[in-house]
Amino acid sequence: MNFLINFIRFSRLHTVIGTTLSILALYLLALSYSGYQDWHLPELLLTLASCLGANIYIVGLNQVTDVEIDRINKPYLPLASGAFSMRTGYVLITASVLFSLAIAFYIGKYLLLTVLLSLALGTAYSLPPFRLKRFTFWAAFCIIAVRGLIVNLLLFLNFHFIVNGRENIPPAVWLLTGAIFVYSIVIAWFKDIPDMEGDSKYEIRTLSLRIGARRVFLIGNVLISLVYILLAASPFLLNFELNGAIFAGSHLLLLALLWIASKRVDLQRKVTVRRYYQFIWVLFFLEYITFAVAGLMG
């Protein structure tokens, strides 16, 4: 039981949930264009397993290379706390990446390209000589490229080709990609706000250290708010494929929740900042759910 709890911490549960929901939403969107005639469940489960393997490799590699920083910023993580040895960490990331690649080779080109690009950026983010997490722009670029672009476009093509035999990207998927792109920017910024002490000590020059946590917090919330306003208006502006009432109403509700939660944050208290960062991930999850439900009801 202790191993399982620590493995969940090692896997960074919020990223696992995000990966799972994104895959399920993209799969349901692809199915909506087929009229739900053939569900292709084995391909769904294999795609999910491959992407989770890549996810665990990326977050695990980051912990392996950041043990000293995590002892300051995230002492509860299993490598930083000593619950897992470094050997265990290396075994887990090696097994995860091999598992992910084996399945991706079997499924096909779009999943394989998704996995290879994600692994390449995840590796460059953490490992020398690149260690892109040291640089504000490139650290954000890695997260934005994977979560905002690669996952949404290539995994939708993976499912669209499997289910429908097509290789085009419909407007709804471009809209989802744009929304998640902005979420990914904000997640990349907000994750560094509570980690400023350790990042400063080890010369990781994040945006929060450059311009201040308060400015980052304000800019991030304004960006997400603009996305919600544009998405709520989109059923009235575009030739819409989703259920417009559900789509617009859901985004107005999310906008209200965002500003209610933001008013409760004290940037001087790490616990409230971490809680808000997790809340942004919840909004990220809800975005995929909103698109999936609006697609099912469209």
Image: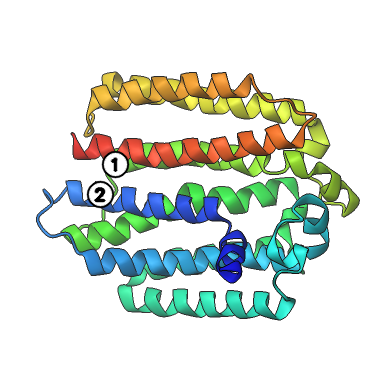
> Does the image show residue 234?
no
Q: Do residues under tags 1 and 2 come within 8 Å of each other at their CB atoms?
A: yes
User: Mark number for residue 157?
Assistant: none
Q: Is residue 284 above or below residue 46?
A: above
- Side of 150 where 10 appears, left or right: right
SS at circle 1: helix
Separation of marks 1 and 2 at Cα, in angstroms: 6 Å
Q: Is residue 264 above or below residue 208?
A: above
Q: Say which mark, if any, is on residue 28.
A: 2
Local packing at callout 2 (Cα closer than 10 Å; few below 14, some 14-19, many 20+) is many
Instruction: Evaluate whether residue 112 shows in this view.
Output: yes
- Mark 2 is on which residue type? Leu
The N terminus lies in which quarter of the figure?
bottom right
Name the residue that disc number 1 marks: 292
Q: Which residue lies at the image location 48% right of the left edge and 18% below the top edge?
A: 256
Task: Give the colouring mode of the picture.
Answer: rainbow
Name which residue lies at 33% across and 52% down. Answer: 24
